[in-house]
Amino acid sequence: MSNLTQTAEMISSGALDARFARLYDDIPAARARFLYLTELYRKQFGEDKDIRFFSAPGRTEVCGNHTDHNHGKVIAAAINLDAVACAEKTDNGIISVKSDKYPGDFIDVAVLTPQEKERDKSAALVRGVAARFVQLGYKIGGLNAVTVNNVLKGSGMSSSASYEVLVGTLLNYLYNDGKISPVTIAEVAQYAENEFFGKPCGLMDQMACSVGGFVEIDFEKTGAPVITPVSFDFASCGHALCIVDTRADHADLTDEYASIRREMEAVAGLFGKTCLRETDEKEVMDNLALVRDKLGERPALRAIHFYNENRRVEAEAKALNEGDFDTFKVLTIESGLSSYTYNQNVFASSQPQSQPVALALAVSESVLKGRGAWRVHGGGFAGTIQAFVPYDLLDEYKRRLEALFGEGACYVLAIRPFGGTEI
């Protein structure tokens, strides 16, 4: 691009507005953010630098609630919150990544094996991405970067996946001319999180962040998931995507989350399989009395949710591909109702007096019934909900939900058509 002073002048003058407009609706806010990023770079690495800008979005789960861990199907989508970087190549063999909020990571590209002291730290993600690039035969090298991430932590929008994809995007464009596919970048990011960071995550988050737009993912073969982009222009549908954070305490809910996978796999085990995707649905449904006798009613209900949700993913993808947003909304409500009544992850059975997600869904229905759609988002129990809100109801919806959960609890978002990219 150009040195820092010239870049700042270009941002201020509007010369980069067309590039920002690909990703952001609020151009003045984008200008301010990238001027801030440029100043951070100046403070960290000095003035006379030739820099480039990069971005990787967060994501939202659209359908497929608690299906991926039993090799099911999901739809996810990139959102218009992102991690951004200002970066340039160096010849010192060090990947230096400095955040505006956290200490920097400094990775020697000559050392590309997992480091125990980096487990659970962002440095492990950087080293893991670089290591996987080399394993796959791609080029890497030194770089300087500063990053800013407005993907909210703990909100189910995958701030960590957006960061991993951002690091892969830096190496892709700075050293490989942007030729590495988004799917490969996602797989690299997952590898870094699994093998270096130490978290056995699936691929949904990274794939949605890297590919952009809506994407259908089939995890029947977890080592080679089938990725199918879904063609739909969200900007044309007349709705905002809202994620509402109920701001409830997630502490002591680990077993509630784990019980879903455990009970689904227990049902599969009764039929000699390791996960529900491997089972024959008719055989399971014909033998619900056996499931009830051996495991109880809730595992049976969660299995029913899994089978129905897998079909719903296919139906929602079809509706979106055909531009049928009304059918998509009907299916979204069905998905949420299934999570509530069958999967039972809207409130914790161990804490029946605490039901913030259920309350958020009830108020959403009162505002949006007949017009929009609403469902639990992500893991559930004490987290976030998702709503598709017609623009003429947006102010009322935001006011009602924030009256319950506090100012700023309702995030008004959009689906972003681009994944990890150079700006």
Image (cartoon, grey):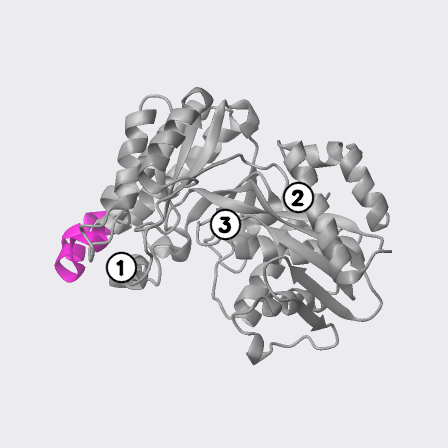
Range of residues picked out in magenta: 283-300
Nearest to the eye among marks 1 and 3: give it.
3
The residue to which callout 3 is attached is 152
Crowd class of label 2 (few under 14; some 14 to 19; many from 20; radius 10 Å)? some
Q: Main secondary structure of the magenta part?
A: helix
Marks 1 and 2, Cα distance to the nearest angstrom?
46 Å
Residue name at image x 65 percent, y 69 percent: 127
Closer to the chain start, of discs 1 and 3, is: 3
Closer to the chain start, of discs 2 and 3, is: 2
Crowd class of label 1 (few under 14; some 14 to 19; many from 20; radius 10 Å)? some
User: In the visual, does 225 lie left or right of 354?
Assistant: right
- In the rendered image of this protein, does residue 422 appear above or below residue 392? below
Q: Find residue 197 and report its horizontal and vertical position in percent.
A: 54, 69
Q: Which mark is residue 322?
A: none
The residue to which callout 2 is attached is 33
Badge 2 marks a residue whose secondary structure is helix
Badge 3 marks a residue whose secondary structure is loop
Q: Which mark is residue 263?
A: 1
Q: Find residue 110 and report its horizontal and vertical position in percent.
A: 75, 76
